[in-house]
Image (cartoon, grey):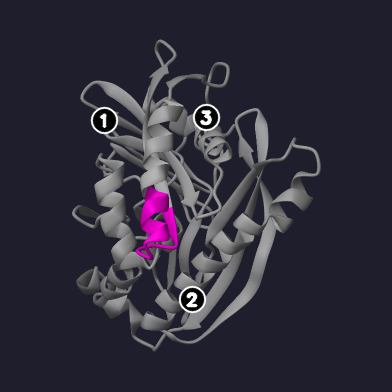
Amino acid sequence: MNLLGAEGRDFLFVISYDRSEIVLYDLHDLPQSLLFHIEGFEESSCEEPESHPPRLFISPPSFEEYLEAMRRVKEEIAAGNTYLLNLTFPTAVELEPGLSLRDIYNYARAPYKLYIEDRFVCFSPESFVRISQNLIRTYPMKGTIDASVECAYDKIVSNPKEIAEHTMIVDLMRNDLNMVGYDTKVEKFRYVHKIAAGKRELLQVSSSIRSRLESGWRARIGDIFRTLTPAGSISGTPKKSTLAIIDEIEGYERGFYTGVFGICSGERVESAVMIRYIEYENGNYIYKSGGGITIESDPVSEYEELIAKIYIPF
């Protein structure tokens, strides 16, 4: 990434959660097996869907399985090894007959989409970092509620657990940006916006943080992403110890799920966190989802949130 950036070449990058796999493509010579959509950039062609919106038939983990994992997370929190941990699970899903991951890519409506043939499709609502005019910004999302819930807005903005969780992630991401830039500031704290979730709408809480970069940042673009990944919103704080706990408790490979993808073009970078993600693995389809756990987290509501995030936005 540093080399391509220093040469002034435009490229698309895909970085797995643990950074063990990084895929780079010349933006002007993309393979036909890859499709992407990033708002504000010229995108791959998208075929118009011909039939009704796709349905998913899901087999989520049992509540007992989730409860045991959450108990272990809370033990680690009580021991002071983590304060916030993003706990995720794989859910087996079946697609309607004749439906493919490429069809889902065509149907899904999201600001960030990525499809790699025979591997996965992602339709993410969450921006990771943007770079423009030597400014780098990030927009951590933390806090979700079904918009149809009575007084949903008031509940999500006043919930003490959600406030604490969001505050910790903002503090983490502010510190991360300060490692790659200077004059770091929180521009907007805890604003609420709606996102499509199939036939439902969700309220999502985000913040905006920015920092300044020294000129010549393109030659350091790989170093910048190495410092900032994995994203704080899908790991936790403190990051190093929390990542080790995630590896021990989750017991499965996230792969590209919760990694990042994006474009470096000219003096701009736009990237997204790869959430809302379906993977093709050993002949099976797996939808991976999760949420942040703090000491105050309620198992029932967190389990319901994990399932609520299994959807295709259309």
Q: Is residue 253 left or right of residue 180?
A: left
Determine which residue is flagged by label 2: 174
Q: Helix, strand or loop at disc 2?
A: helix
Relative image position of residue 44 (x, y in whole percent):
42, 44
Amino acid type of the residue that numbered disc 1 sits on in the rendered structure? Asp
Relative image position of residue 52 (x, y in whole percent):
58, 17
Q: Helix, strand or loop at disc 1?
A: loop
Q: Quadrant of the N terminus?
A: bottom left
Relative image position of residue 35 (x, y in whole percent):
37, 41
Mark 1 closeness class: few <14, some 14–19, many ≥20 residues within 10 Å: some
Whole-angstrom CA distance, mark 2 to mark 3, is 35 Å
Question: With respect to residue 201, does 239 lie above or below?
Answer: below
Q: Helix, strand or loop at disc 3?
A: helix
Does the residue at mark 3 contact the one at mark 1 (Cβ under 8 Å)? no
Judging depth in this view, the residue of 193 and 170 nearest the camera is 170
- On the image, which quarter does residue 27 sit in? bottom left
Amino acid type of the residue that numbered disc 3 sits on in the rendered structure? Tyr
Determine which residue is flagged by label 3: 107
Residue under the image location 52 percent in, 39 percent down: 299
Q: Is residue 126 left or right of residue 262?
A: right
- On the image, which quarter does residue 15 sit in? bottom left
Residue under the image location 45 percent in, 33 percent down: 105
